[in-house]
Image (cartoon, grey):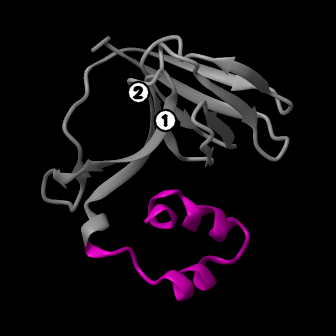
Amino acid sequence: MVAHHSCAINEAAERGLADALLYELGPPPDDLADALIHCDMTTGPDGQTHAEEKIVNLKANGTLGAMRSDTIKVTGVEFGRNPAKYVNDWHNAPRRQYIINLDAGVQITASDGESRKIGAGEVILVEDTTGKGHLSKALDGRLRHCIFVTLDDK
């Protein structure tokens, strides 16, 4: 499931491996063709940060085959750059926000011990504004440009 919506095909294409990836995995399953997947980091009742995959359903939009999710109300947009040696020790999200990686990835470790690599082109929703939080560090020693899309508090 992750390989079909993690921009793996984009990474494979850059390395000349798109055909091999499609040969190995085949096309996305029908139930994922109308969805996008992102990682959601939340604080559980135990005070620990947990990571889980969330599916965003898409629906037809117009006659050109475009698909869109329902609108999500946002409160702001910030553009950012993190250095190639970026390491951010245990911390909470400063607010509920989506982070969209543009050109490089980040490794996020939740306080429950689960670690996820969020690659270039992928989206993470951070909501762990309380509790122990998470660790963040640059992947592959690469400078990372990203967009932060801030949300209302729940």
User: Is the C terminus in the top left, top right, bottom left or bottom right quadrant?
Assistant: top left
Q: Amino acid at mark 2?
A: Gly
Number of residues whose C-alpha sits closer than 10 Å to that of mark 1, classed few (under 14), some (14–19) or many (20 or more): many
Q: Residues within 10 Å of mark 2 (few under 14, many from 20)?
A: few
Secondary structure at numbered mark 1: strand
CB atoms of marks 1 and 2 within 8 Å: yes
What residue is drawn where x is 51% and y is 26%? 48
Q: Which mark is residue 44?
A: 2
Q: Earlier in the sequence, mark 1 or mark 2?
A: 2
Q: Is residue 122 above or below residue 49?
A: below
Query: Residue at horizontal 62%, vertical 85%?
Result: 20
Magenta residues, start to end: 1-30
Type of amino acid under label 1:
His
Is 103 placed left or right of 41 in the picture? right
**x then y, percent, for residue 42:** 43, 28
Q: Quadrant of residue 150?
A: top left
Question: Which residue is the site of mark 1?
Answer: 50
